[in-house]
Image (spheres, helix red, strand yellow):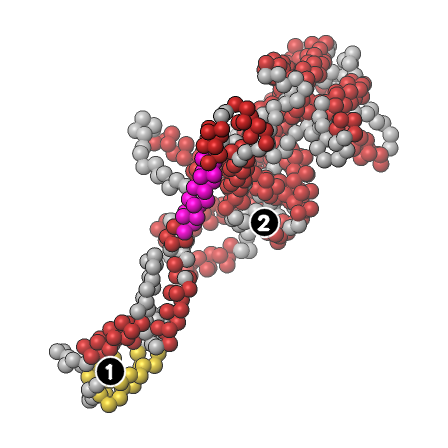
Amino acid sequence: MRSFLSILRSILDAVMDGNGTITTCDDSVISHYTFYQYSLIPAVVLTLLFACTKTRQQRLTDFLGGRPGLVAPMNTLTRQSRISYCCAFGATAFLVYQILLEQKFAIDYQGPLCFLTLIAILTMFVYGIVYFPVFACLAMKSAFSFGLGSLYVWMFLAVDVYEILDCDLTEKGRKVMLARSLPSVGCLAYLGVSLPIRFVVSCYKKQYFTGPEERTWESLDDIKESYQGLHVRKLFRPPQLNWETNNDISRTKRIIMRYLDKWIYHVEPGFRYPSLLVSVLFVAACVVYMITVDLMFSSVDIFDVLIATQDRRLDIIGWHKQLAEDPLVTEERNQIFSHKHDIFVVETSLVLSIVLSYLLTSLNILHMLASFRSNLFAMYKGDFRTIPPPSSKNAVWLCTGCIKYTGFQVGFIVWGYIYMSVLLFGLVFFLALMFDGKLMELVEEIRNICETWPGVVVAIVLFIIQGLLAKFVFLQRWGRFLRLDNRNSYFIFAYTSCFFTTSSWAIVIGSSFLARLDSSTLPRKFECWDSGLSAYTGYVHMEAAHTHPVVNVFIRLLVSLKQRRENNSSNPATEINMVLNFDSNDLEGDMRYSRLNSVNVNAKFKWFLVYTLLQNPQIRMYRKGYIQSLKKARKRGLRVPPSDSPISLIDIDQLERQREESIRASLAPSTRHTAFSVPGSSSFRAPPSLVASEEASDIGVSAEFPQLSSFEGQARSGDRELLVPV
């Protein structure tokens, strides 16, 4: 099974016939396979040494003093040491590049193809153990780990630099190899400088074999200034609307900045991305950069050789037309110039497509960060419109998806970049054919293209027409509102266009967003089959479940309060110290103050509880006395207005007297004519007490009046006039 770049290099070697630029170092003194196989020895030794400095926390804690302990290479939920972890992952970027596109494993295997998968799994195991000490030294944060980690990183850096300088390459080949190895060498150089500095700092803090201990409690200021605390404090503030405009910024620049903030990336103060997410996207960006460098120089070399071949043919037959020249020679010369022009068009299209793909992939990675932040905030709020809720999948499914996220994200980004390059090359080459030559040649080329690819042209024109009609014809206010204006025209066009709509645009959009794990290319009902989206969903749920800022701050406040109470409470050691250093009067006063302080705290807490219950407007309507009075009033046909006063007292007798007075007042002679010309009727205003509810339907009313023998009628909700017989 041959990889993409290996096939490209085979074509390059066949075309160049050994005269091209060599960018690989296969004849190096240090063999790739031998180096990583022998690197297992120091990696295992360092891992065991790191484990001896750790103690077991749960099992066999008394055996051998609790050592060795379990060493974790990285806390996947941490937000600390993001740059260091990015460089640690970036040091492995060249290995990822070789695995994905060159299939270069840790074992030189030439056997049957059926065992290739086993060799690949064994290679992942070898690479993981070799780079394990680099991550472990960052996680342990001790002088011992930083010192050994520095020596280990220097070994990798020295080997990489030696390979670049020792290879027998041309000047151009050495530049290409240096440009391709720049991310991994730069990351190793950063670690080679930062780890010794951390070693010195740890020695100064006397953290020789153990890292800084986790604080059992934090002060309120520490919690407030953490990034979770800043997020929680922001939730309690009203949103700030920025009405001010900077006149110094031009309108064009303001529009561009607004577009970038909305669609690409915007800064969110107080938010920190997980170290794992940043590291994975950084590795993917490094691998894409290496592929771009390799494709650029390889393709340029191929086209240079092709143009040189045409130049040699011109050297034979002559570059210019001679007198009395054979027409066949003239025709061949014209064909050669035409071929050179075609080669130039293809080369320009390929280089432009590679550059555009790299830029779009970089912007896509930035948008992934912003999308992850938006999805995580939505998860914090309980908004599951984009990401399925955790109840839709079990915990095992989400955990396995989180485990698979790192590999899936890198693989999707790399192959999405390759597919996008192929797609953009076809598009750029198509546009180059359209705009190549003079005006008449352009018209002829367009006619030929339309005859050859009518479906493509129709699809492009139809897409443009759909957008224009939707904005200026079908929607109100030029597309500002999702409300149809010319409905019949819309129905006719929608019916007609359904026969021309194909999946071509879906393929284009799907290829552009193939690297996005948060945007599935499958329909909503089939998203469960998208392994990339499943991995992303598991990772987001895992982050939201363990890093929710409100829950985090709440728990930290509880722990801080508990620790503060424990520190304030007296223990035997404290009592002995007090007896030895203070006299009896001071001791008695301090103990009395401690008891009074405890009583004051309890009294304050009870008073705050009572005050909160009295002032809470949500629970005033559910008090026992108010509900009982409301039931009695409804049985007697009285209307009780809702009240949220702290103490609601309902006098039912007073409400009944008010109803009778309002009825007597309503029977007074009316100064106006009857509301309806009904013979023998008189109109009066119904008192509010007769209306039981504003939301009720028609209700029956029966009452006795002093001036009338009986009264029966119908009152509707909200009616204030009633027709009664006279």
The x and y percentages for residue 286 are 62, 25
572 relative position to 238: left or right: right
Does 208 sit left or right of 68 as displayed?
A: left
Q: Quadrant of residue 250?
A: top left
Identify the image quadrant of residue 189. Answer: top right
By secondary structure, the bulk of the magenta-drawn segment is best described as helix
Q: Quadrant of the C terminus?
A: bottom left
Q: Reading the chain from its start, which is encountered first: label 1 or label 2?
A: 2
Task: Give the quadrant of the N terminus.
Answer: top right
Is residue 603 a member of the stretch shown in magenta?
A: yes
Residue 365: assigned label: none
Residue 245, given in percent of the width and then of the height, sits at: 31, 32
Name the residue tied to disc 1.
723
Give 503 or 396, whichever is nearer the viewer. Answer: 396
Residue extending farthest front: 584
Q: Residue at x 39, y 40 (%)?
A: 237
Image disc number at residue 388: 2
Position of residue 623 relative to residue 393, above or below, is below
Give yes or no for residue 90 being in the magenta stretch: no
